[in-house]
Amino acid sequence: MPQLVKIPFASVDYTVTFAWPNLKLIADRAPTAQKIVDALLPYNFALKNLEVQSPSNPAEHKLIFRLPERAFSFQFGAESYSVTKDRADWPSVQQDMEIIEALEQAMSSVEKIDVKARTVTLAMHLQLLEAQRADIMAPFLPAGMRSFYQDKDVISHGVHVKWDRSSIMLDYSLAFANGIFVRIINDYAAETTLINMADDVRFTEAMVLGLLGVEEAYYV
């Protein structure tokens, strides 16, 4: 029977990388910025939540738009744009995708953007309610390392595996007692839709929870 966990914190980062740098996006930022503001106004965007970063390196130029009540931010530069959602959960995904679609339409209405790739990163902390994380993580400690120090107890350990276009990290959480940190990164082709990426990430999350032998206790 799966062990119960709660998820006290989760965040999602969605990054779209351009096929090549588009300097027009930072040389004359006003048209794109106005379109972004227009797209965010229905979600209570305030101008005080716009940050402009203009360092000497053009690759680091960016505009950051924040919706604090939603723990949602959007930023763009010459090489990419990205969305970060803190306090992420699945019930809010539909509205988050609506905002992202509006932002992507706003970006493309000003400048033609050739997309190279899309990347979604899900990071979350699982806090065990009854079981101990050492027991849950024990199967992921290599036998050679388990016996490396015969006279010492293992304090923490983790695993990080990369595949073509995907990676998964499991580690002891430093933020939550008896917690496990999970990070899932998936790369997608340029033509992949938001709904397809969301479905794939949700499937991967379910597979990782199954691998750990845990499930979320929604009543907590």
Image (tube, rainbow, N blue to C red):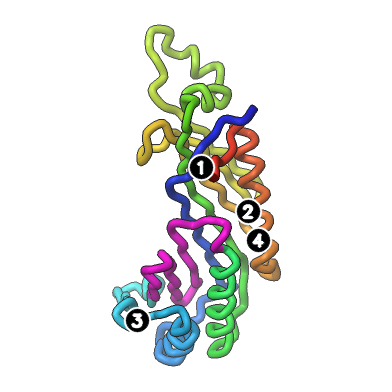
- Which residue carries the number 3 mark? 46
- Residue shown at 54%/85% (left/top)? 106
Give the CA separation, mark 4 to mark 3: 29 Å
With 84 as the anchor, is 208 left or right in this view?
A: right
Mark 4 is on which residue type?
A: Met
**Which numbered dot is residue 201?**
2
Label 3 element class:
loop
The one of 106 and 44 positioned closer to us in this rendering: 44
Residue 127 among those drawn in magenta: no
Q: Which mark is residue 29?
A: none
Residue 209 vs residue 139, the one in the foreground? 209
Rounded to the nearest whole Å, what is the CA distance between mark 1 and mark 2?
Answer: 13 Å
Kindly report which numbered mark, 4 or 3, lies closer to the viewer in this rendering: 3
Q: Where does the image place residue 87, in percent across and percent down from the top left?
A: 44, 56
Of marks 2 and 3, the one in the foreground: 3
Image quadrant where one finds the N terminus? top right
Q: Is residue 123 left or right of residue 151?
A: right
Element class at badge 2: helix
Q: Which residue is mark 4?
A: 197
Question: What amino acid type is highlighted by mark number 3?
Answer: Ala
Res. 24 in view: no
